[in-house]
Amino acid sequence: MIRVTLDLTCSICDHDQFHLPVRADERQQVRCANCTAFKCYSADLEKAMITLARERQRRSEQQRVNAA
Ligand SMILES: [Zn+2]
């Protein structure tokens, strides 16, 4: 497991650090580094991160439009 800080927070304790599985073992679980609550499967997390990145990009583009 590796410990990483994500742009996500634990729904239980609001912690933003998570343990990610490093090996491609059968259960790709992402768990909160603080309370060890199950967050999601890493495949879902990847999708969530992509969605989040897109959302952020869209927001920064909107800010540029508003500033002009
Ligand atoms: Zn937690």
Image (cartoon, rainbow, N blue to C red):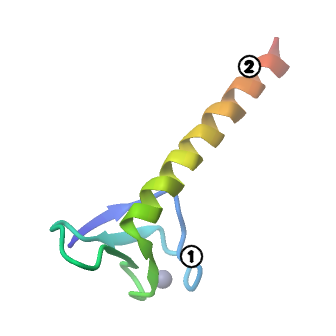
| Vertical arrangement, residue 48 with respect to residue 13, above or below | above
Quadrant occupied by the C terminus: top right
| Mark seen at residue 53 | none
Mark 1: few/some/many CA within 10 Å (<14, 14-19, 20+): few
Helix, strand or loop at label 2? It is helix
Residue 14: image tag? 1
Q: Residue at x 39, y 60 (%)?
A: 5
Residue 58 quadrant: top right
**Relative depth, front residue between 27 and 7:** 27
Q: Residue at x 18, y 75 (%)?
A: 25
> On screen, 35 above or below 45?
below
Mark 2 surroundings: few (<14), some (14-19) or many (≥20) residues within 10 A: few
Figure check: 11 above or below 23 = below
Amino acid of disc 2: Arg
Judge by depth and name the residue closer to the eye, 28 or 6: 28
Q: Residue at x 67, y 29 (%)?
A: 60
x, y (%) of residue 43? 39, 62
User: x and y percent of residue 1 in the render?
Assistant: 20, 73
Mark sitting earlier along the chain (1/2)? 1
Q: Does dot 1 land on a helix, a strand or a loop?
A: loop
Distance CA(mark 1)–CA(mark 2): 30 Å
Q: Which residue is mark 2?
A: 64
24 vs 49, left or right, is: left
In the rendered structure, the answer to whether residue 68 lies left or right of residue 43 reads right
Q: Where, by quadrant of the figure, is residue 33 drawn? A: bottom left
Queried on whether the Cβ of the residue with tag 1 lies below 8 angstroms from ligand 1, the answer reads yes
Q: Amino acid at mark 1?
A: Asp
